Image (spheres, coloured by chain):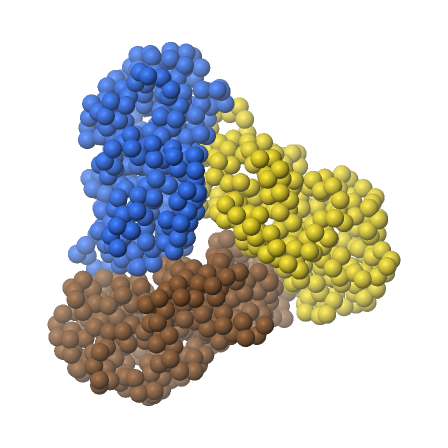
Chain colours: A brown, B blue, C yellow
Amino acid sequence: MKQFFSVADVADLSNIVDEALRLKSNPFAYEHLGKRKTLGLVFLNPSLRTRLSTQKAAIHLGMDVMVMNMDKDGWALETRDGIAMNGTTVEHIREAAAVMGQYCDILGIRSFPKLEDRDVDYGEDLFRKFIAFCGVPVVSLESATRHPLQSLTDLITIREHWHQPRKPKVVMAWAPHVKALPQAVPNSFAEWMSRAQAEGLMDFTIAHPPGYSLSEQFTQGATMTNLLDEALEGADFVYVKNWSSYEDYGKVQHISESWMLDHAKLALTNQAKVMHCLPVRRDVELASEVLDGPHSLVIQEAGNRVWGAQVVLKRMLEQLLLDK
Amino acid sequence: MKQFFSVADVADLSNIVDEALRLKSNPFAYEHLGKRKTLGLVFLNPSLRTRLSTQKAAIHLGMDVMVMNMDKDGWALETRDGIAMNGTTVEHIREAAAVMGQYCDILGIRSFPKLEDRDVDYGEDLFRKFIAFCGVPVVSLESATRHPLQSLTDLITIREHWHQPRKPKVVMAWAPHVKALPQAVPNSFAEWMSRAQAEGLMDFTIAHPPGYSLSEQFTQGATMTNLLDEALEGADFVYVKNWSSYEDYGKVQHISESWMLDHAKLALTNQAKVMHCLPVRRDVELASEVLDGPHSLVIQEAGNRVWGAQVVLKRMLEQLLLDK
Amino acid sequence: MKQFFSVADVADLSNIVDEALRLKSNPFAYEHLGKRKTLGLVFLNPSLRTRLSTQKAAIHLGMDVMVMNMDKDGWALETRDGIAMNGTTVEHIREAAAVMGQYCDILGIRSFPKLEDRDVDYGEDLFRKFIAFCGVPVVSLESATRHPLQSLTDLITIREHWHQPRKPKVVMAWAPHVKALPQAVPNSFAEWMSRAQAEGLMDFTIAHPPGYSLSEQFTQGATMTNLLDEALEGADFVYVKNWSSYEDYGKVQHISESWMLDHAKLALTNQAKVMHCLPVRRDVELASEVLDGPHSLVIQEAGNRVWGAQVVLKRMLEQLLLDK
């Protein structure tokens, strides 16, 4: 594995999930694999779970970790080509990426969308240029349109909590919020679960209010509905997530409180387990009664971020050995 | 030891001080104890000594350390229950603490008081919830009302610099400052030294101007006076510290420059050693002539922060082994 | 080596460059030298290359690294003596330096000039006091007037890319910029290359517009000119760098775009290699066509920062062993 940006970077979902769960049962089994290798984590935006879980994964593999908060420890990056840098950006991504590649064997980078111009965000310019210029394997720590470490972890968590012979019904349910959030997490969850459905691992449904359709590139094969109650019927897992509009880009079209998952709504499901990538706005996105109840998997899901990150880093380290 | 929040978490002061001094004489004696264990340090406020000394202590014990600056790398935490999170807080302490507990074997957290509402600050809500929800041992890196790593270190420093058979006279002397400071350090020093007095290790006096009484829960048994000169007579150690008013909460009632310790005041003592937790405002809280003179222990005291932290981490690691 | 602040701290340039290149060919050859030793990196200003390359160098040597961002994780430092600290500074350099020296075996510190008062900046007050009070070896991570790790690295890079028996002609060429930059990098490059010229390793020329002379203490023996084209004739290495005026201190006297190195100007040289310390303003300081072409060494130069830092840390660690 030389990059981890989308589900397309993984050949077989079942294999990678199995491998992650084996790492969970024996975290230090590969602690010599990363010896004398350095992971650089570059944050252009805040991070709690991704920051700590990826560090922890690297520690399990024996790697050294260097963290770079570019918005605070560093400076503003330019991504455009063909312009004179006489404004506020201090360094071009071409140099910044190449230089970081000089110091690290693997790099991770987080860069949120601005939610102003859809073509700019969905072009993933910064991310693609970072990959192109740094010269080492790159892990997405969340880009403008995807958060693959989260989605891989979500798949691991679903596998870990499903013990029946039939396929589970997994529902991603839009939820209210007070701010305009990126589509990165729902895009990514949709493309990973659609792929999981195609591989026969689940049935996947997306429920959202009118005006909140995701880009079709992420939702191939998923059942789509605007009726939350109908979607929840027979659900085994409910993945709660807010996102801003893709169509009316970055806008919050309306906030319908009736979309918040609570005990009453949960009663419509098949005793579903409830997931959320966190951070979660209590009693806005998701009722406290659900978060604090026995159906919630949100903490276990966050804990599993370690194994999602670790299996990706392990595969990249193995590739580095092969390439030598 | 499963938490380190106040002096009540330590069974015997002499034992823990002796153990800390043994660690000082052989810092790496337990470097395998923390192998494959991760310490997470969470800062909601700035830190120099606590940050570096606790990292260093963890390194001596072979632990991996992950630092999280929540005010900058992360986001604003909600601590209240039963409210809809539709404001500026992004994540609830319930999730944030539980998630950090997933990634770390021991957690440290620093959270200053706001000095606006005494009941809120003295309720130690954030700290107590953090302990309740994170699921792993927690070390206070300074909370709203206490700074136990500092006070333990102060006791270590006094022991290290006292070689006479009689008990030393230890005086905590209020000092002027230009800002309103928390009572955490003086509260903590008072509760630790009162306990040390009760265990027969010293005589303890607190001197402060009228209006600066500390909460009685911290000062049991201490001699209290508003007369600095009288308190200094025969003092073997003078602990200089400013604090804002507990009674007229968080207010600076007056700034009496006559309370600054200088050579003239030091002459009243028994050649006392002078201590301060740092940072110190030179020639406001404490005269430069004292800080730069042979009576000052402030640098050795800061250096000893390593051993205070290390003995606490060592005991927590040993408890983790027992619990397995 | 007990401090690394200027070229005067190195006895023989050829030796240290050779040693650095040996480290590059075998990075982990001394990985036991720094075992149980802690490097503290103190940043009063942002840093990308220096931060990461110095960490990486320390990792190669087996050291533990603690990073302290004083402008964000810590607080404002006072450097003046004899004043009452009743203003905005929270801690005096005397205490801050001494305390950090308690926790670290070697310290690095970065502190930029304010460019307001030449005597203040060139007095290097903060840096000299930090060295005086911390009590351990100190590496400059860039001070008000010098950036010696950069210049040592530049010399390493020139040596690495020069394979002819004759001495190379090295030209430092002033370049336009949109901001007023310190003289630290050009001062340092000038004092290192002047010394290299004195040791018979190169011929060294400085070209800048009128009004941009550097302080004479850094340029002994260098050929100085205001004619860029003449300087570029026969150049084997061109070191591109902007700086603000030393004479009219900290001012940008004029911005002459004709001083930007592009292909046309490069054609005047002897197929010169082009260097820059980065970050670089594309098409302001240096043409993209040069940066992206085969003559640019800027990425290799940044990569070599590791070996510059590593040879300095290695020598300091060896000195610590001798001093024991």
Q: Quadrant of residue B277?
A: top left
Q: Position of residue B208 (x, y in %)?
A: 29, 21
Q: Nearer the viewer, residue B109 or B199?
A: B199
Query: Is residue A98 visible in this depiction of the protein?
Result: yes
Residue at image x 16%, y 78%? A269
> In terms of depth relative to the viewer, which is nearer, B74 or C306?
C306
Residue C46 picture location, percent across and down: 54, 50
Residue at image point 64% right, 58% down:
C26
Query: Could you tell me if residue C316 is visible in this image?
Result: no
Image quadrant where residue A309 sits: bottom left
On screen, residue A188 above or below B264: below
Q: In the figure, is residue C252 to the left or right of A200? A: right
Side of B153 where A143 appears, left or right: right
Count of marks, rendered view: 0
Question: A104 and C50: which one is in front?
Answer: A104
Q: Nearer the viewer, residue B230 or B192?
A: B192
Q: Which residue appears at 23% of the width and 36% of the height? A: B11
Q: Is residue C188 above or below residue B96?
A: above
Q: Quadrant location of the N terminus of chain C?
A: top right
Q: In the image, residue B105 lies at what x, y percent?
A: 32, 54
Residue A250 placement: quadrant: bottom left
**In the image, is residue C61 above or below residue B268?**
below
Q: Locate residue C157, reporting x and y percent.
A: 72, 57
Q: Quarter of the image for the C terminus of chain C: give it.
A: top right
Q: Residue at x 65, y 34 (%)?
A: C123
